[in-house]
Structures are given as structure tokens and as C-alpha cells.
Image (cartoon, helix red, strand yellow):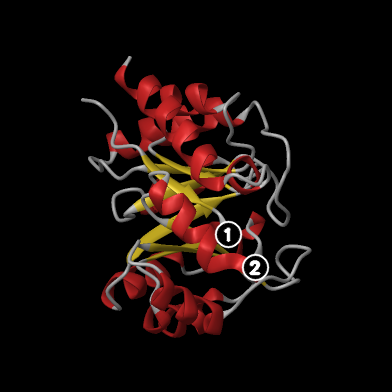
Amino acid sequence: MTPTIRLAPSILSANFATLGADIDAVTRGGADQIHVDVMDGHFVPNITIGVPVVKSLRKATTLPLDVHLMITDPDLYLEPFIDAGADMLSVHVEVLPHLHRTVTQIKKLGAKAGVVINPSTPVQSLEDIAALVDYVLVMSVNPGFGGQVFIPHSIEKIQRVRAMLDRAGNAAPIEVDGGVDLTTVEQVVRAGAEWLVAGNAIFGGGQPEQAARALKDKALSAARR
């Protein structure tokens, strides 16, 4: 079965002075959802956006908002972000001692629930939640900043996550975030990723519409092979 490729431009690399125009551009270029990185300066060494920006984004686009919580205590913010317009909410296994409860709560609040693992986090940490998640986000760089280089070991990790989900009887997609560009997207898709987060590769060159279209076309081509 051909994977369902979804392109998720990350606004972390967009121009916030013209954010609405950048979102319109990637939408014309074939974006399927907008990836929103929420960082608290504690779990990761950077501070980005919060609930008010997500609420504004909800008014600026009809695309699903794919909100990635890179924060120390995500349980406190599930409902505010979903109320603000998040369609998908992903949380890190590294900060959640009661992951099952958190995933269940996200679903109860009406959003898709994703679980994220960092580059040094073993795939086995997902085993007991694999049947329940709506998607898994594999970080292919260390989270915190855009424009980083793809970690090659991530390819094998994507494959192992896909095998684990399949064993659990869960067809949930794998999302990949970090260093996804025209040089890495084919191997990422062939490894089993379906949702592709890209920031610098789309917004870094000043032509987000064309960059989004080129990246999605290459991903779709890889998926068909």
C-alpha cells in the first residue's frame, strides 16, 4: 500500500513578520498541515510560541495545526492548546511518567494524540503505548533549533518504530522532524515515514511555495516506488 504522504511545514523557520503570507504560500505549494513547535526553554534550550499564537494561526489557515509540545509539563497545557485550535498534539515520552493517561486525555479532548522520541531515546520506550497512539514523531535532530543536520541513525529508528506499530496492529503514521530536505526525504519515506516536517528546507530560501512543492513531489515519488 502506498504511504499517505503529508507535508508539515514548520513555522519555526518562517518569517513571523509575514507569517500569514508564508502559510498561504506553503498551502499553495501543497502543504497538508502546519507544524507548530512549542518550546519552553526548560525541556529544550529555546523559547518559541504559546497558546495565543496557535489561536491566531487557527484564524489564518484551514489546514490542520500539528502542535508539538517540547515542554517540561505538557499535561498543564493540553486543553488550552486544543481549545486554541490544535488538531494534533504530540508530547515527549522523556517528560511524561504517566504517558498512557496523557495520550488518553488528548484523545478525550478531541485531538489526535502523538508521542515523540528524541534521538537518544530508545524505540522500546513506546512499546506499551504503541497500540494507542494516533501517530509517532521521530526526532531526527536534537530538538530546540531549526536548521540542524539530519542524524543518519534516524533511518533505522523509523524502520523499528514502523515494525513496532505494525506488531501492535496500529497503522498510525510516523512523522519525522529534523533535517528533512531534498537530500534526505527519499530515504526517510522509504524507511516508513509518512508525515514530513520541514522548516529551513521550505522557508530558508525565500520561496516557500516552490520549496514546499518540490519537497512534496520528491516525497510522493519516493512513496510510489
Regarding mark 2 in the picture, which secondary structure is present there? helix
- In-image side of 154 versus 164 (left or right): right
Quarter-wise, where is residue 213 in the image? Answer: top left
Quarter-wise, where is residue 94 in the image? Answer: bottom right
- Percent from the top left, x then y, of residue 223? 34, 24
- Which mark lies nearer to you, 2 or 1? 2
Dot 2 crowding, Cα within 10 Å, few <14, some 14–19, many 20+: few
Q: Residue at x 43, y 72 (%)?
A: 60
Question: Which quadrant is the N terminus positioned in?
Answer: top left
Q: Is residue 126 visible?
A: no
- CB of mark 2 within 8 Å of CB of mark 1? yes
Dot 1 crowding, Cα within 10 Å, few <14, some 14–19, many 20+: many
- In-image side of 38 versus 176 (left or right): right
Q: Residue at x 38, y 72 (%)?
A: 101
Three-letter amino acid code of the residue under disc 1: Ile
Identify the residue under disc 1.
11
Q: Against 100, is 121 above or below? A: above
Q: Residue at x 48, y 31 (%)?
A: 214
- In-image side of 130 versus 68 (left or right): left
Q: Against 123, is 20 above or below? A: below
Q: Residue furthest top?
A: 225
Three-letter amino acid code of the residue under disc 2: Phe
Q: Against 182, is 179 above or below? A: below
Earlier along the polypeptide chain: callout 2 or callout 1? 1
> Label 2 to label 1, Cα distance in Å?
8 Å
Regarding mark 1 in the picture, which secondary structure is present there? helix
- Percent from the top left, x then y, of residue 119? 64, 42
Quarter-wise, where is residue 153 in the image? Answer: top right
Identify the residue under disc 2.
16
State the residue in front, 12 or 15.
15
State the residue in front, 149 or 165.
149
Question: Which quadrant is the C terminus positioned in?
Answer: top left
